Image (spheres, grey):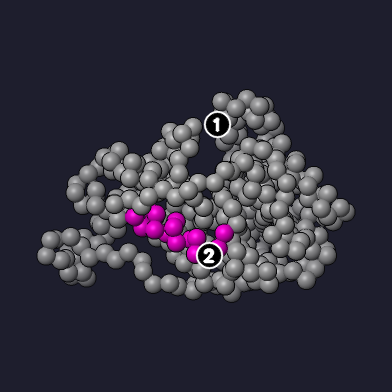
Amino acid sequence: MAARRRTSFKLGVTGLGERQEIAPGLFINTFYRGCTPGFVVTDEGLILIDTPLIPKQAKDWREQIEAEAPGLPILYVFNTDHHRGHALGNQYFLPTTVIAHERAFKEMSGYTENFKERVYNSFKREPEIQEQLTNIEIILPDVTFTDCARLKYGGREIQLIYAGGHTPATSIAWLPEEKIAFVGDILWVDQHPYMAQADSLEWIEALRRIRTLGAERLVPGHGPVCRPDDTHRVEKYILFKRKRVRDYYRAGKTKNEAKSGLVGEMLEWFPVPLERKAKIESQIKSGINRVYREIQREEELAGAESVNGALQPPSNGAPVLHEPQAEANLIPTPVAVEANQ
């Protein structure tokens, strides 16, 4: 049975909103669309985490940053992902050095004029935003990393750690002294996570890694600042989706039948504003589509191994498969960053 919806909170996703200082010299803004951007003030300059999608909001964010730390240069912009909500605003924070996972560089290198047109067209029902998106400039990462990197400036240390799960590029920013982690779209608070590009098992593993960091607070990609225990809700959501999709697959149902049959069950997990119901249903279906392909591969592999004697099927003939259970501390040691040539 699906879990009941939790109480929702009001998100100002279209306004400007004032910055919030969540630790000395560490600021976020939860009022922008696409992500929750942040910046860290050091004696040597500023390190930004993600950039707002909407140009008006990006310009407002820069004004707030300059008002808070006048005269300090922007040393780095760190994109936790390649998705437009995290990286499309890079152009409004130059000059700077953009840093991201190496897969983000690969994905963003493929952003053509067609991509820009799709972004523009996606706001056709919001002409006041659409008219701001006529001069999109893709700013690629200048510096990439594979597993992790460490930035040390002005007495601050920020570890950039690859996580995956949400996308093949998703990474987090961990401030060990402050015990705060910016976890990007690995964590959605009281909202349905976007899973169209996900690896669900890797996502579960990433959530469990985050709980081993020793963080006291997390800044999610969507939602308010929260605690590590809030990662359990998203993990349960993903595990439930995997279980129900597997049920449908083993019952001989097609991918489309799984999407039609499960969207109602998944809707019950988080609040759904009426005006966004159709969009969220589409989002859920894209996630089911992704998970169905994963389950199909897993079942086919398990079946092949069973035939070869690697697995003994249970009495009902279904192959033995185990969902992830144990916590794991798999955070790699930070290494030097590598610049793109």
170 sits to left or right of 302: right
Type of residue at label 2? Answer: Pro
In front: label 1 or label 2: 2
| Horizontal and vertical percent position of residue 27 | 72, 56
Tag 2 residue? 228
Is any part of residue 255 visible from this angle? no
- Above-or-below relation of 256 to 205: above
Tag 1 residue? 122
Q: Check the picture and name the quadrant holding the C terminus.
A: bottom right
Q: Between 170 and 189, which is closer to the camera in this rendering?
A: 189
> Residue 254 sits in which quadrant?
top left
32 sits to left or right of 76: left
The magenta region covers 226-240
> Residue 91 sits in which quadrant?
top right
303 sits to left or right of 184: left
Question: Counting residues from the N terminus, which is met first, the one under dot 1 or under dot 2?
Answer: 1
| Horizontal and vertical percent position of residue 241 | 34, 52
Is any part of residue 312 visible from this angle? yes
**At 39% from the left edge and 54% from the top edge, which residue is drawn?**
237
Pointers 1 and 2 in contact (CB under 8 A)? no
Label 1 – label 2 distance at C-alpha = 33 Å
**At 59% from the left edge and 37% from the top edge, which residue is drawn?**
112
> Residue 312 sits in which quadrant?
bottom left
- Alpha-carbon neighbours of circle 1 within 10 Å: few (<14), some, or many (≥20)? few
Residue 76's label in the rendered image is: none
| Horizontal and vertical percent position of residue 186 | 51, 56
190 sits to left or right of 79: left
